[in-house]
Image (cartoon, grey):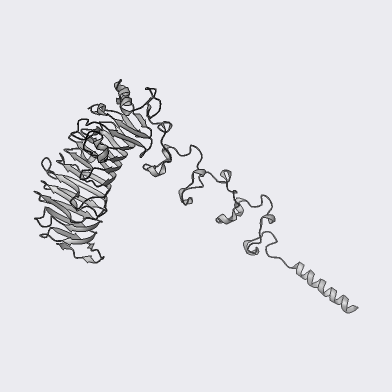
């Protein structure tokens, strides 16, 4: 019996001693080291116990219940660009939260637009007139662009004052647009509701040879539609062609108009053209035709050529009047032939001693024969950067040309040649570029820091 009591007493003494020991963390605070991983679950936490001051470091997304972070739980300014990864879906954008000020220039492309553009989205115009195939009231809606323009022409202030828009709804519109053959300024945008669905076909020459065409006069912009003919920009100021597909009529379509030649492209220019924009344009001319052909321009540095996709055509520039440089950016060529060049320049120094053409990000598909062609030109400067020029026969050719300079940097060139088979038309300088083949000609090709098709270094110097 005494043994049993002693045993129990011993156990009580042990328990008492243990209870008398200080327990780390419970005499005041519970520290991180005192908590087993995973021990703190939602039922263990009293409402309001976890305050901002109790949290150190970031809380991972896996610890946040679905829907627990809402607008009220996010501090103003807490979500910055750096906190956002991936695209934001439309369901996360409040109605009206995306406005003009929040959209970066150039961010809205064709691919970003769903459906057609309605007049309610054209808020920057003093008036929006609709051209469509339905019932027209001949005040705010018409059945042709010609009728809409005739309405505006009733009063000069209608077209030369605040900018207005003619919205062309989907459909094909065969148009006599001779009304635009004028030296007046037309502060009007002709806008297609659908780039591929709103189709305009000119049905007369409008003063441009045998080409069924439309003039783009000063002040007028053609946007977001398909044009099946030729556009000319003689002496045009502050105007442009943006987001337009320019496609030649088929031979059958052309014959339906009495055998008219089915030209398509952009031409004209002349002395007073300035601030003219060609941007985001696809051009598919008839076989063997130029896509863009301008002549005798002076304010070359105000002309914008950007994001132009050319199928089967080429660029032609003649007789620049000043040394102000032309600049071409993001130009793509495809569907050419072995006898075509990408770019032709003729009579370049009749009026200026050193005409200059700058090309950035030019891409070809290897179907064209030549890169550049110079005719009756000297002291011409052509500068090419960041481009991929895949050609079949030669980089630059020409006739009656000398003392020209072609400079290429940071590019991929399939063939470096200088008027092969004839005297060089000047010098070629190529730096920091890949060259598939060099065809030497009288030490007229200089390379610096270049490599060949196998990425082997090419000796610096003349070839």
Which image quadrant is residue 56 in?
A: bottom right
Identified at 25% across, 52% down, the residue is 385
Identified at 35% across, 40% down, the residue is 196
Which image quadrant is residue 413 in?
A: bottom left
Expressed as whole percent of the image width and height from the top left, the position of residue 189 reads: 33, 32
Residue at the top extreme? 154
Q: Is residue 351 visible?
A: yes
Viewer-proximal residue, 291 or 355? 291
Viewer-proximal residue, 443 or 17? 443
Quarter of the picture holding the C terminus: bottom left
Viewer-proximal residue, 441 or 403? 441
Callout count: 0
Expressed as whole percent of the image width and height from the top left, the position of residue 418 reads: 14, 56
Q: Is residue 109 visible?
A: no
Quarter of the picture holding the N terminus: bottom right
Viewer-proximal residue, 332 or 10? 332
Residue 124 higher or lower than 326, as above or below: above
Residue at the right extreme? 1
Residue 131 higher or lower than 29, as above or below: above
Expressed as whole percent of the image width and height from the top left, the position of residue 150 reads: 30, 23
Expressed as whole percent of the image width and height from the top left, the position of residue 425 reads: 11, 52
Identified at 65% across, 64% down, the residue is 34
């Amino acid at each position: 019996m005494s043994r049993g009591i002693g045993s129990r007493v011993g156990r009580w003494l042990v328990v008492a001693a243990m209870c008398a020991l200080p327990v780390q963390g419970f005499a005041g605070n519970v520290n991180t080291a005192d908590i087993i991983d995973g021990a703190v679950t939602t039922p263990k936490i009293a409402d309001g116990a976890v305050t901002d001051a109790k949290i150190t470091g970031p809380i991972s997304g896996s610890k946040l219940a679905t829907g627990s972070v809402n607008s009220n739980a996010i501090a103003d300014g807490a979500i910055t660009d750096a906190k956002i990864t991936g695209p934001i879906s439309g369901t996360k954008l409040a109605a009206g939260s995306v406005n003009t000020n929040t959209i970066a220039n150039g961010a809205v492309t064709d691919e970003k637009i769903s459906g057609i553009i309605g007049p309610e989205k054209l808020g920057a115009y003093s008036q929006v007139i609709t051209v469509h195939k339905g019932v027209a009231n001949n005040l705010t809606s018409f059945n042709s662009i010609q009728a809409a323009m005739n309405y505006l022409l009733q009063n000069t202030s209608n077209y030369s004052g605040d900018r207005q828009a003619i919205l062309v709804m989907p459909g094909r519109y065969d148009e006599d647009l001779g009304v635009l053959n004028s030296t007046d300024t037309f502060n009007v945008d002709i806008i297609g509701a659908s780039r591929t669905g709103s189709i305009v076909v000119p049905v007369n020459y409008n003063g441009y040879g045998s080409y069924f065409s439309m003039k783009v006069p000063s002040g007028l912009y053609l946007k977001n539609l398909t044009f099946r003919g030729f556009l000319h920009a003689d002496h045009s100021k502050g105007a442009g062609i943006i987001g337009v597909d320019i496609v030649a009529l088929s031979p059958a379509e052309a014959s339906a108009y009495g055998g008219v030649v089915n030209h398509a492209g952009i031409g004209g220019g002349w002395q007073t053209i300035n601030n003219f924009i060609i941007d985001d344009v696809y051009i598919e001319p008839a076989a063997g035709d130029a896509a863009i052909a301008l002549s005798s321009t002076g304010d070359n540095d105000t002309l914008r050529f950007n994001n132009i996709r050319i199928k089967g055509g080429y660029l032609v520039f003649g007789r620049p009047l000043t040394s102000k440089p032309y600049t071409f950016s993001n130009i793509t060529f495809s569907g050419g032939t072995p006898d075509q060049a990408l770019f032709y320049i003729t009579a370049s120094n009749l009026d200026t001693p050193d005409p200059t053409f700058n090309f950035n990000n030019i891409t070809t598909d290897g179907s064209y024969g030549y890169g550049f062609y110079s005719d009756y030109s000297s002291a011409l400067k052509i500068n090419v950067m960041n481009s991929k020029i895949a050609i079949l026969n030669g980089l630059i050719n020409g006739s009656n040309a000398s003392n020209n300079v072609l400079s290429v940097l940071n590019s991929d060139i399939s063939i470096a040649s200088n008027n092969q088979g004839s005297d060089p038309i000047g010098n070629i300088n190529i730096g920091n570029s890949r060259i598939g083949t060099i065809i030497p000609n009288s030490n007229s090709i200089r390379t610096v820091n270049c490599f060949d098709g196998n990425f082997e270094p090419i000796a610096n110097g003349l070839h």
